Image (cartoon, grey):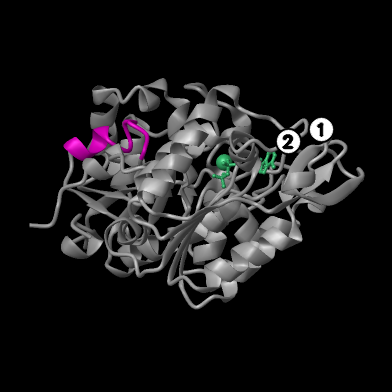
Amino acid sequence: MQKKTVRDINVARKRVLVRVDFNVPLDMNSGAISDDSRIRASLPTIRYLIDHKARVILCSHLGRPKGEVVEELRIAPVANCLSQLIGLPVNAVADSVGQRIENEVSELKQGDILFLENVRFHSEEEANDPYFAQKLAQLADVYVNDAFSAAHRVHASIVGVAKYLPAVAGFLMEEELNAMSKLLTSPAHPFACLIGGAKVGDKIDLIQNMLKRIDILLLGGGMAATFLKAQGHEIGHSLVEKDKLNLAQELLQEAEEWKVPLILPVDMVVADEIKVNTVTKVVSISDIPPTGWLVDIGPKTVELFSNELRKCHTIMWNGPLGVYEIAQFAQGTRSLAELLSSVNAVTVIGGGSSAEIVHEMGLTDKMTHVSTGGGASLRFLEGLPLPGVEALPNKI
Ligand code: ADP
Ligand code: MG
């Protein structure tokens, strides 16, 4: 990676402001953290700083408080969770900037960890207010960005602050960028993209940017319906993005021009309704009834996709292949997640839902890389710059 990292600077005795993305899911009833994987993902950076005698100041957003203090979105429970995971005290303070916080920071000793309050309690954060960015910068001597999953945001703690301090990438940022850029620049071939998710519109730019790099494209999920319709198939009640039909046709043609086989499902699970305990049946795509919803890929498609994926040396997966939130419609997605965890290939998972499934199935360690950033990884693979990464200087 070209960006400077924590390895390239001296952090001993320095006050180090670390932007992490600990925007973890909270249980609606209890407020408990339901998935701590984002916190775990930044542990290597925090541990490294502690081991190298830094004074650590952490900064994160949590949820969408929209510039106001929201009690349920205070950072303290997240700081507690980190404290347990890292086995060290973590002092959560009640604001992100100002005299009181500066006093707290001045008390920090080597190896201490202070956690600033949810930075989105200040509207200046999302507005990338330069004065607010300066106030954050005043707290520290060095800035480390480990928040890959927020790197597509032009916010004060991500972009603004990097102007006022020596800035470097953390290990998670480095790992994410390495995994993603390898896909764009030097993937081992054959290289397959497996793409699902709800809508074609969300993934068009991704598909277009990947077509010139891949050897095969496998499509499932809600968007498959639009492609099947574009090929003249019946698709029942399934949501077809009418304005996207032409786009689907164009993509089919583009794939042909790049000589990339675009493989669509050959059978689908059709449900009477999109809800639990409904009647389902598996039909071939030539027998889709005019009523019913296409909710998952069928077993023949799982087999077809699996056979193709087994031949590949690199696989990028983004988006569930069915309405996986309902267990009955999750089989296709689960089978392919299982397959990816067993193949002898570089496997990179992007997309919030896809990553969630992999974590939930306990397969994370069997994949080469599971991105912590849905929106950020999508943007990166679309070939667009990430403002939070652009703000970091290159190695000399
Ligand atoms: P990711 O977060 O992994 O990038 P997306 O956000 O693009 O994935 O899409 C996730 C959503 O796609 C899920 O909520 C899932 O229910 C939906 N989806 C997948 N397949 C279908 C389908 N056949 N019909 C309707 N929605 C679907
Ligand atoms: Mg998503």
Q: Main secondary structure of the magenta part?
A: loop
Q: CA distance from mark 1 to mark 2?
A: 7 Å
Q: Nearer the viewer, residue 93 or 32?
A: 32
Q: Which residue is mark 1?
A: 290
Q: Is 321 positioned to the left or the right of 62 in the image?
A: right
**In the depicted structure, whether residue 378 falls above or below residue 80:** above
Q: Nearer the viewer, residue 162 or 340?
A: 340
**In the depicted structure, whether residue 173 falls above or below residue 242:** below
Number of numbered discs on residues: 2
Q: Residues within 10 Å of mark 1 (few under 14, many from 20)?
A: few
**Which of the 4 image quarters holds residue 64?**
top right
Residue 21 spot, x, y in % from top left: 45, 46
Tell me which amino acid carries mark 1: Pro
Residue drawn at x 61%, y 67% is 306
Residue 136 spot, x, y in % from top left: 29, 35
SS state under label 2 = loop
Residue drawn at x 28%, y 45% is 106
Q: Is 262 positioned to the left or the right of 6 in the image?
A: right
**Which of the 4 image quarters holds residue 358?**
bottom right
Q: Is residue 337 visible?
A: no
Tell me which amino acid carries mark 2: Glu
CB of mark 2 near ligand 1 (< 8 Å):
no
SS state under label 1 = loop
Q: Is residue 347 visible?
A: yes
Q: Which residue is mark 2?
A: 234
**Picture disc at residue 140:** none
Q: Nearer the viewer, residue 193 or 175?
A: 193
Sequence order check, earlier mark of 1 and 2: 2
Residue drawn at x 52%, y 48% is 351
Q: Is 208 positioned to the left or the right of 226 in the image?
A: left
The span picked out in magenta is 152-163
